Image (cartoon, rainbow, N blue to C red):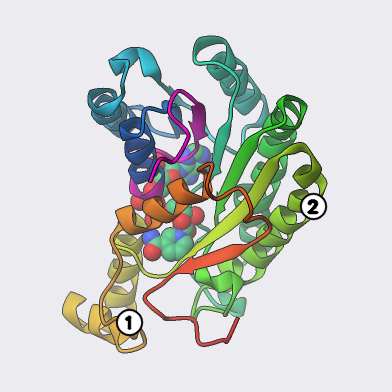
Amino acid sequence: MDLEIRGKTALICAASRGFGKATALRLAAEGVKVAMCARGRETLDEAAGEAAVLAAGGARDVLARAVDVTDAGAMRNFVNETEQVLGPIDLLLVNAGGPPAGRFADLDSDQWDAAYRLNLASAVDLCRLVMPGMMERGWGRIVQVTSVSVKQPVENLMLSSVIRPAAHALARWLAVEAAPRGVTVNSVAPGFHTTSAVERLIARKMEDTGCTREDVIAGWTRDIPLGRLGDPDELAALIVFLMSGPAGYITGQCIASDGGWVKGTF
Ligand code: NAD
């Protein structure tokens, strides 16, 4: 299938590892110019090097900058530089690290504030910077990485289970505003995929429970009808499809990639 995105420009947040990196690599392989950011320089440069190998124009089609998505000024500069170097942004992946694990009694006000800034306010700021240009040009695709916690609270992940539904509500709202101007806005909701974020969750659970790594994974996969954790590239494939031309009639949705973990009907 022709995804109709060759030659377009994408801005991918949190792209040094995990879903962001997997999406940047898939887009580069589709002939998309990619601007990638993450907090740390070293792993980001490695990821950008991999993207340059796949990109049609090599390193000329890849821009990588160490930017924290919660720093609105730095994000504004990154968006401006991307548009100057690679062209107007057609595709946007709203993504960041996740909030810490914990239950109600474990979490203090600073952690609540930080989760709001990381997983909701940064998305508002970024859409404010990028969406108006897309609407003016009459075409755009925004995809936001959330979590299955949008659809069903996840044990011991209270911050994610409260903040992420609000983040999807933002996408749902923007989808309606942007639709008349050819811009779609969707969320993807990963279940358990083998990224470094999940490795950290496994380590935390091993520490809390004294279980082995295999026990922790077996505990999760018991609740996953497909019986395994996902590969980050399986979520990236969904993201890239939602960014494509043929996905133009899908907007305001939150689509899970979770091996069947969510138990609700919708
Ligand atoms: P990861 O740890 O593999 O990668 C996280 C990336 O985010 C890294 O590139 C890191 O540098 C970057 N990052 C973190 N904070 C940042 C910030 N403030 N500004 C810029 N970049 C930042 O994680 P991942 O699994 O790819 O997770 C991406 C998102 O998906 C997270 O919000 C995570 O909570 C969520 N999620 C992951 C899973 C899963 O199974 N992996 C499940 C549900 C939700």
Magenta segment, principal secondary structure? loop
Please say if 100 is above or below 130: below
Disc 2 crowd, CA 10 A, few/some/many (<14, 14-19, 20+) = some
Left/right of residue 215 with respect to residue 7 in the rendered view: left
In this rendered view, identify the residue nearer to me: 72 or 135. 135
Q: Residue at x 55, y 50 (%)?
A: 247
Q: Residue at x 27, y 76 (%)?
A: 206
Q: Is residue 4 magenta?
A: yes
Contact? badges 2 and 1 (CB < 8 Å): no
Disc marking residue 118: none
Q: Quadrant of the C terminus?
A: bottom right
Which residue in the structure is indicated by mark 1?
Answer: 220
Q: Quadrant of residue 82?
A: top right
In front: label 2 or label 1: 2
Give the residues drawn in magenta, as a range: 1-19
Q: Where is residue 249 in the image (x, y as percent from the top left)?
A: 64, 53
Per the image, label 1 sits on a secondary structure element best described as helix
Q: Residue at x 76, y 46 (%)?
A: 179
Q: Where is residue 208 in the image (x, y as percent from the top left)?
A: 34, 79
Residue 114 visible within the image: no
Which residue sits furthest front? 1
Q: Quadrant of residue 25?
A: top left
Q: What residue type is labelled 1?
A: Trp
Residue 250 visible within the image: yes
Please say if 236 is above or below 212: above
In this rendered view, identify the residue nearer to me: 249 or 257. 249
Which residue in the structure is indicated by mark 2?
Answer: 176
